[in-house]
Image (tube, grey):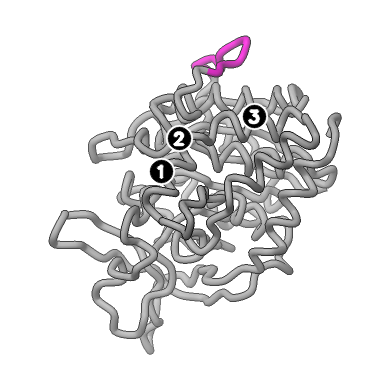
Amino acid sequence: MRKVIVDTDTGVDDALALMLLAADPDVQILAVVSVFGNCHGDRAADNARYVLDTCGRQDVPVYRGSDQPLLQELRLSSGVHGDDGFGNTGLRPETSVPTEPDGVDVILDLVARHPNEIDYLALGPQTNLARALESEPLLLQKLRSTTIVGTLGPALYGDTEPWADRRFRVSRDPNVSFDIDAAQRVAACAGDVTWCGPYVTRQALVPEAFFLEIASSTGHAPAELITKISKDYAGFYSRSYGRPADARVMGINDSLAVATLLRPDLVAGSVQRPLQTFDDPQNGERYLAGVHPEPDERRPLHRIIFDMDFAGVLDMIEGVLRRPLPW
């Protein structure tokens, strides 16, 4: 049984990722901890609770984590996921997630109780991880693995502007740039760490019709929830990443990280790289990208995903959404 902690700023693609985990009989979700990003941290916690309740997984505990970045000003992706993270649908769980205990304390306690047994999945900014590292500097080495949605991917040799790749022409790497200080702390730590960022996730734009057909043909609550909360989300992706004949598409970013963790056979390409910070002088943004190691490299090497079996990931998603409850 795989033990997992999910760290999420629960928006649309996070909801789908949570469903993939909730449906897997070989996964024990020890905790879901919220973080700001797609919406405010308290709302991210409530959204996660709503998703899990919809999936019949009231047994999975949800905790509130970080509401603010470590140092910089708070920014949110409300233009993509809506002010509530759920496409402004107003969906809320019957009972909101309480403010206590602090999700970071929960993380530290679980890792202490299950050393080297927990797979950590970070779907939003890395603030919770960075705060936990302040108390336990060897945290990443005490986790079985850490999978993070973030980084610009592997930079070309000698590249000084990795953000200029056409994949980033609309949105670059908010999970890192929304709290670059937290991301840098994580990047500087040794451990079994995998980054699955927009370099690979932006390659997988899925037709909205894929989800609409599953929901209409099955009537299953999880599939119907995805279609309810993704109307504005698909609108953003369709406007930003146009397709022929005005076909509406949407991203499945966080599901690729789940697939990386649960189905390593679906990873088609990865490299071991140290991470380096890059500054964009035009807008002042800071990003992380994997660079080629120096001859006397002392920075930790982390795994960076650059290609996936996208058809295999879609098969995985379809299999889950077509599966009737209970999971």
Give the secondary structure at mark 3.
helix
Please state which amino acid type lies under the numbered disc 1. Answer: Phe
Q: Using a 10 Å C-alpha cutoff, classify the residue at mark 3 as few (fewer than 14 neighbours), some (14 to 19) or many (20 or more).
A: many
When the figure is inspected, residue 49 is found, relative to residue 116, above or below; the finding is: above
- Is residue 94 one of those drawn in magenta? yes
Q: Closer to us: mark 3 or mark 2?
A: 2
Front-lying residue, 254 or 274:
254
Which segment did they paint magenta?
91-100
What amino acid type should be assigned to the residue bearing mark 2?
Asp
Earlier in the chain: of badge 1 and badge 3, it is 3
Asked if the stretch drawn in magenta spans residue 234, the answer is no
Numbered badge on residue 232: 2
Q: Residue at x 56, y 16 (%)?
A: 92
Disc 3 residue type (three-letter): Leu
Where residue 93 sits: x, y (%)? 60, 15
Task: Please name the residue shown 21% across and 62% down the image.
Answer: 279
Give the quarter of the image for residue 96.
Answer: top right
Residue tagged by mark 1?
236
Q: Which mark is residue 115?
A: none
Kindly tell me whether residue 146 is visible in this rendering: no
State if disc 1 and disc 2 touch (CB < 8 Å): yes
Of residues 303 and 245, which is closer to you in this image?
A: 245
Query: Crowding at label 2, few (<14), some or many (≥20) Cα neighbours within 10 Å?
Result: many
Most common secondary structure along the magenta stretch: loop
In contact (CB < 8 Å): disc 1 and disc 3: no
Q: Look at the image and tell me whether residue 56 can be seen.
A: yes
The mark that comes first in sequence, 3 or 2, is 3
Q: Could you tell whether 180 is left or right of 113 in the image? A: left
Q: Is residue 242 left or right of residue 258?
A: left
Residue receiving disc 3? 225
